[in-house]
Amino acid sequence: MNTPIQEEHLTTADLAGIASGENRAADDRETQTQTADRPRPLFPEDVAGDFRSRWDSVQTSFVDEPRKAVQQADELVAQAIKRLADSFAQERNRMEGQWDRGDQVSTEDLRIALQTYRSFFQRLLAI
């Protein structure tokens, strides 16, 4: 005997993968977890590109003025380190603000905060 196959009717929303409100919240938490687990670059791409471009210029100038090139390299490294320290200080302050709200913080918020700290810590150790 052949059992009739019941066709499943999908909506455009089903095909597009749009989640309901409850599923969207779970998806948002999952995205936050994945984002916290993925190390971000130390600098935004435009800043990193600027540093690379400036380094190329310093390196090229070495042939004609080696002492000046080394001095410029020292200054560029100092600027990069300062930018990195400032960036990490701002990020730490932002993270602290996420969980340091007294008793009004949910366990889920604290879990996400811990994951963010883990990612931040891994970035620090990768330097």
Image (tube, grey):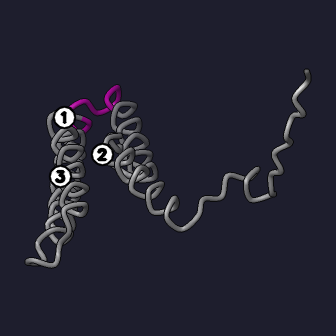
Comparing labels 3 and 2, the label whose residue is closer to the camera: 3
Look at label 1 and name its amino acid.
Ile
Q: Which quarter of the rendered picture does the C terminus lie within?
A: top left
Q: Residues within 10 Å of mark 3 (few under 14, many from 20)?
A: some
> Separation of disc 3 and disc 2 at Cα?
19 Å
* 86 horizontally vs 59: left or right: left
x 37%, y 54%: residue: 32
Name the outermost residue toward the front: 1
Percent of width and height locating residue 9: 83, 50
x 45%, y 63%: residue: 25
Name the outermost residue toward the top: 1
Percent of width and height locating residue 31: 43, 51
Q: Check disc 1 and report the residue beneath it.
A: 127
- Total numbered labels placed on residues in the image: 3
Classify mark 1: helix, strand or loop. loop
> Separation of disc 3 and disc 1 at Cα?
20 Å
Look at label 2 and name its amino acid.
Leu
Sequence-first disc among 3 and 2? 2
x 31%, y 48%: residue: 36
Q: Check disc 3 and report the residue beneath it.
A: 114
> Where 6 sits versus 25, above or below?
above
Classify mark 2: helix, strand or loop. loop
In magenta segment, residue 65: yes
Look at label 3 and name its amino acid.
Leu
Report the disc number at residue 42: 2
Residue interval drawn in magenta: 62-69
* 52 horizontally vs 118: left or right: right
